[in-house]
Amino acid sequence: MPRSGFAASLSTPKVDVVIDMGNPFLNHTVDAFLKIGSVAATRAAAEDVYYIVKRRNVSRHSMEHSLKKMCKEGAYWGTVAGVYAGMEYGAERIRGSRDWKNAMLGGALTGALISAASNDDKDKIVKAALTGGAIATAAEFLNYLT
């Protein structure tokens, strides 16, 4: 009996830019800042292009607004990612082990630090620390599943 089959592989292109800062802590932090910052800037650009096309109005003002939004979003989310990567790496170095607890500590410290930088409400800072720790831990567990 004749048989036929199909085999294929789908892989995403990987672009990896390495900037050696001379210190592993700085390398992790800068790498996270650049990767997540560029993703956030790209998301902001895509969102603005959608609205510009929807309104059918391209102007110098809309382009300047888009560029400012891209820079702001990229810097904000890049900073959050850089702080998280640095905190997680620091927890790993201090604890001497690599497990989900580092993600939990890194997320909690990042949530608390980012929240403390933007407000003085202690309850909000604690909530942000708990949220950051929970999200980072959940993401780490999801990485183990895949």
Image (cartoon, rainbow, N blue to C red):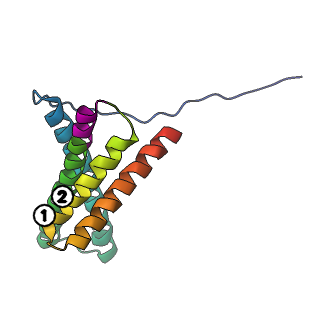
Q: Amino acid at mark 2?
A: Leu
**Residue 69 visible within the image:** no
Mark 1 and mark 2: Cα distance apart in space: 6 Å
- Residues in magenta? 88-96
Name the element at disc 2.
helix
Is most of the magenta stretch helix, strand or loop?
helix
Q: Residue at x 27, y 65 (%)?
A: 126
Instruction: Choose top left, top right, bottom left or bottom right for residue 98.
Output: top left
Q: Nearer the viewer, residue 78 or 145?
A: 145
User: Mark 2 = which residue?
Assistant: 113
Q: Residue at x 20, y 51 (%)?
A: 78
Q: Nearer the viewer, residue 52 or 22?
A: 22
Report crowding for label 1: few under 14, some 14 to 19, many 20 or more residues within 10 A (C-alpha). few
- Name the spot of residue 125 as percent of width and height, x first: 23, 66
Q: Nearer the viewer, residue 108 or 53?
A: 108
Instruction: Choose top left, top right, bottom left or bottom right for residue 41.
Output: bottom left
- Name the spot of residue 119 as percent of width and height, x first: 15, 71
- Name the spot of residue 37 as percent of width and height, x first: 22, 50
Residue 117: numbered disc: 1
